């Protein structure tokens, strides 16, 4: 009788342990909850940092926050509940770089005077993704799956301004004034599956694989040149070709979504 009672008590105790919510010793929930946000970063710098302590050369440097992909998209999630999350990614890049070069004035003077040649490079890259993620698992190891779609745009333009005008004293046959790249448009839709393990409360290591459809097109660009024909300045504009691509495949390399299969660190808050 005592043996039976002990077995029943032990079974009851074990069932209670497994039935409890996953929490830390301080009572912090380990898994994400409804209303939580999450941001994903590249895990490589942190894994390398830890690995160098074990077998490195002692020249360890502190890890840094890295994007998950070379397209520098910020990826995040919002948890509708503990088993469902909305996913989103965004990159908004608008910028320009201007370089000034001093060149001697033409015709030459004594002492030498200088004028400015200015090259300005500008462009933009915009990427947006959105999707839904469903999760499975009752332990620190969580599986997930779902689908998402993405869209991207890219433009570029280079402008050259010269301090010396073309003339009989500066009779260049041709020089570039402007290079305008065609607008690039990308669209993709994919299904994904992955897993992550919560090494600490609300901090997980994981990764995913995906499969889907992606298309990309680049429109016509323009190159504008000018040259001296012996009498006047002639300006010529030349069209560049178009390009397009289509693929149905796994998406380890994908400009819309970023790489799949990489190890990532997810921070929930």
Image (cartoon, helix red, strand yellow):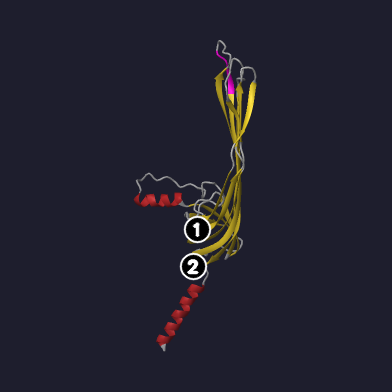
Label disc, if present, on residue 209 of the rendered structure: 1
* Image quadrant assignment for residue 114: top right
What is the crowding at mark 1: few (fewer than 14 residues within 10 Å), some, or many (at least 20)? some
Magenta residues, dominant SS class: strand
Magenta extent: 112-116
Is 133 situated left or right of 8 in this image?
A: right
Q: Quadrant of residue 221?
A: top right
Q: Residue placed farthest to the top in the image?
A: 110
Name the residue nearer the viewer: 79 or 50: 79
User: The N terminus is located in which quarter?
Assistant: bottom left
Number of residues whose C-alpha sits closer than 10 Å to that of mark 2, classed few (under 14), some (14–19) or many (20 or more)? few
| In this rendering, position of residue 20 left or right of residue 6 | right
Q: Nearer the viewer, residue 158 or 78?
A: 158
* Residue nearest the observer in this picture, 24 or 133: 133
Instruction: Give the residue at x 51% y 46%.
Output: 70
Tag 2 residue:
139
């Amino acid at each position: 009788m005592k043996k039976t009672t002990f077995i029943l008590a032990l079974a009851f105790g074990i069932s209670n342990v497994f039935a409890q919510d996953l929490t830390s010793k301080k009572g912090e929930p380990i898994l994400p909850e409804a209303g939580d946000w999450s941001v994903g970063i590249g895990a490589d710098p942190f894994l390398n940092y830890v690995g160098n302590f074990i077998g490195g050369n002692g020249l360890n440097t502190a890890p840094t926050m890295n994007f998950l992909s070379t397209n520098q998209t910020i990826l995040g999630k919002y948890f509708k509940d503990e088993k469902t999350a909305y996913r989103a990614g965004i990159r908004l890049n608008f910028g320009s770089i201007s370089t000034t070069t001093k060149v001697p004035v033409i015709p030459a003077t004594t002492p030498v005077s200088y004028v400015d040649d200015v090259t300005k490079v500008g462009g933009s890259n915009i990427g947006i993704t959105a999707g839904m993620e469903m999760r499975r698992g009752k332990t620190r190891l969580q599986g997930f799956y779902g689908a998402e779609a993405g869209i991207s745009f890219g433009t570029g333009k280079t402008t050259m301004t010269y301090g010396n005008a073309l003339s009989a004293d500066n009779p260049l046959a041709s020089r570039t004034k402007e290079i305008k790249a065609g607008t690039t448009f990308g669209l993709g839709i994919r299904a994904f599956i992955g897993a992550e393990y919560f090494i600490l409360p609300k901090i997980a290591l994981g990764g995913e694989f995906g499969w889907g459809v992606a298309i990309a097109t680049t429109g016509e660009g323009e190159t504008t040149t000018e040259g001296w024909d012996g009498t006047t300045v002639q300006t010529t504009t030349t069209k560049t070709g178009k390009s397009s691509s289509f693929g149905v495949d796994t998406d380890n390399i994908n400009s819309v979504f970023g790489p799949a299969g990489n190890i990532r660190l997810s921070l929930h808050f």
